[in-house]
Image (cartoon, rainbow, N blue to C red):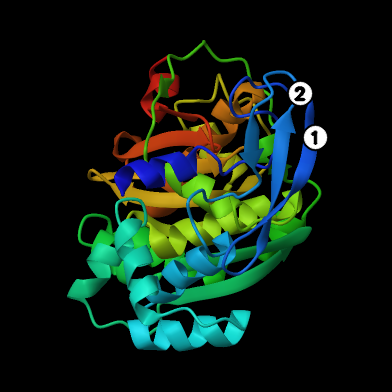
């Protein structure tokens, strides 16, 4: 089963190239019927091999049925309730045993499935959310159970994430005089970024199966990780740094900025006794300024929570690459 799951992850990207020779000269070669759908068959004109358009290989049901079943279960619904919700929503008849098989098959990736067994969960109270209209719409969400668990190590983080929903200084984010973290350009020494295969990549690949359009990718990745990952505690978290805080910091020479800085953290995880500040960046290898952006997110959250920078890890990822570094690398330099 692990082999099948790994093979399915390798095919979660939209069909653009041949999976065998990477050629982009492919043609349609009819469709094949599976249980609930027809899947497109392709042929590569370079290597002559055939491959399917199924995002999850070796599966008889559509990816959105499989992944929504796992998500519905991890929201705290029983298998019976999950079965009823999925069958009604997608107009299908998925056996309860099949949903149970999916949750177990993907539990190595969707790790919250193992954690939820220890707690009694109310699906209606597990996720708290609020929309912020900060020039564009950001939906801040946090996972109540995982955030309470993280509070044992970082109580100030929990306090900030909960309180920001009602105490966010919205005027700062709407003020044209404020600077967004993503728009700041700074010269910093080249950092040795750690690249590795980790669970964020696997979750991202699965989540992208649910995105029908490119502009849905951010939302689907954040939602899927928040509900199904055991480490993700919050998404789209507003943060800010006042001018006076920058002036008093040891980074005055580096951050010669006379304006308030604002931003929204894509994903906050707590794992290995560290707070991980993550940004989802499609085509990570083309991102040059993401180091500064994620560092400023981290610096802002550190100031807002009074948690030392040594307790943070900065990172960004897409479905293929994951990078991380310590914020202290920039401070020390």
Q: Secondary structure at mark 2?
A: loop
**Residue 145 screen position, x and y as percent:** 31, 71
Residue at horizontal 79%, vertical 25%? 25
Q: Secondary structure at mark 1?
A: strand
Q: Which residue is mark 2?
A: 45
Question: As drawn, is 73 to the left or to the right of 150?
Answer: right
Question: As drawn, is 258 to the left or to the right of 275?
Answer: right
Q: Which residue is mark 1?
A: 27
Q: Which mark is residue 77?
A: none
**Residue 275 screen position, x and y as percent:** 34, 45
Q: Is residue 229 above or below residue 303?
A: below
Front-lying residue, 217 or 314: 217
Q: Earlier in the sequence, mark 1 or mark 2?
A: 1
Residue 306 seen: no
Quadrant of the snapshot with the C terminus: top left
- Crowd band around label 1 with a 10 angstrom C-alpha radius: few (<14), some (14–19), many (20+): few
Residue at horizontal 62%, vertical 66%? 139
Front-lying residue, 296 or 289: 289
Residue at horizontal 65%, vertical 71%? 131
Q: Is residue 98 above or below residue 52?
A: below
**Residue 181 screen position, x and y as percent:** 64, 39
Residue at horizontal 73%, vertical 18%? 46
Q: CA distance from mark 1 to mark 2?
A: 7 Å
Residue 294 seen: yes
Front-lying residue, 21 or 259: 21
The quarter of the displayed image where residue 274 is located: top left
């Amino acid at each position: 089963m692990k082999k099948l799951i790994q093979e399915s992850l390798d095919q979660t990207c939209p069909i653009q190239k041949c999976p065998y020779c990477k050629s982009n000269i492919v043609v349609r070669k009819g469709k094949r019927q599976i249980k609930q759908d027809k899947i497109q068959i392709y042929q590569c004109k370079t290597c002559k091999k055939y491959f399917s358009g199924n995002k999850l290989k070796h599966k008889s049901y559509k990816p959105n049925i499989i992944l929504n079943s796992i998500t519905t279960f991890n929201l705290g619904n029983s298998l019976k309730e999950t079965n009823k919700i999925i069958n009604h929503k997608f107009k299908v008849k998925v056996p309860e045993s099949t949903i149970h098989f999916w949750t177990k098959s993907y539990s190595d990736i969707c790790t919250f499935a193992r954690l939820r067994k220890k707690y009694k969960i109310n699906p209606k109270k597990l996720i708290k959310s609020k929309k912020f209209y900060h020039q564009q719409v950001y939906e801040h969400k946090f996972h109540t159970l995982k955030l309470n668990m993280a509070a044992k190590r970082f109580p100030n983080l929990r306090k900030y994430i909960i309180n920001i929903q009602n105490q966010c200084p919205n005027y700062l984010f709407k003020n044209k005089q404020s600077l967004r973290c993503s728009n700041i350009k700074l010269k910093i020494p080249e950092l040795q970024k750690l690249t590795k295969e980790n669970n964020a990549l696997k979750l991202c690949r699965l989540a992208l199966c649910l995105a029908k359009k490119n502009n849905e990718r951010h939302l689907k990745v954040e939602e899927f990780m928040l509900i199904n990952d055991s480490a993700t505690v919050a998404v789209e978290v507003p943060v800010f740094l006042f001018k006076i805080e920058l002036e008093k910091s040891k980074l005055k020479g580096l951050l010669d900025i006379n304006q308030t800085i604002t931003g929204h953290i894509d994903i906050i995880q707590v794992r290995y006794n560290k707070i991980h500040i993550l940004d989802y960046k499609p085509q990570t290898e083309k991102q040059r300024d993401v180091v500064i952006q994620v560092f400023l997110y981290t610096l802002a959250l550190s100031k807002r929570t009074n948690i030392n920078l040594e307790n943070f890890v900065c990172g960004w990822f897409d479905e293929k690459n994951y990078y991380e570094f310590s914020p202290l690398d920039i401070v020390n330099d």
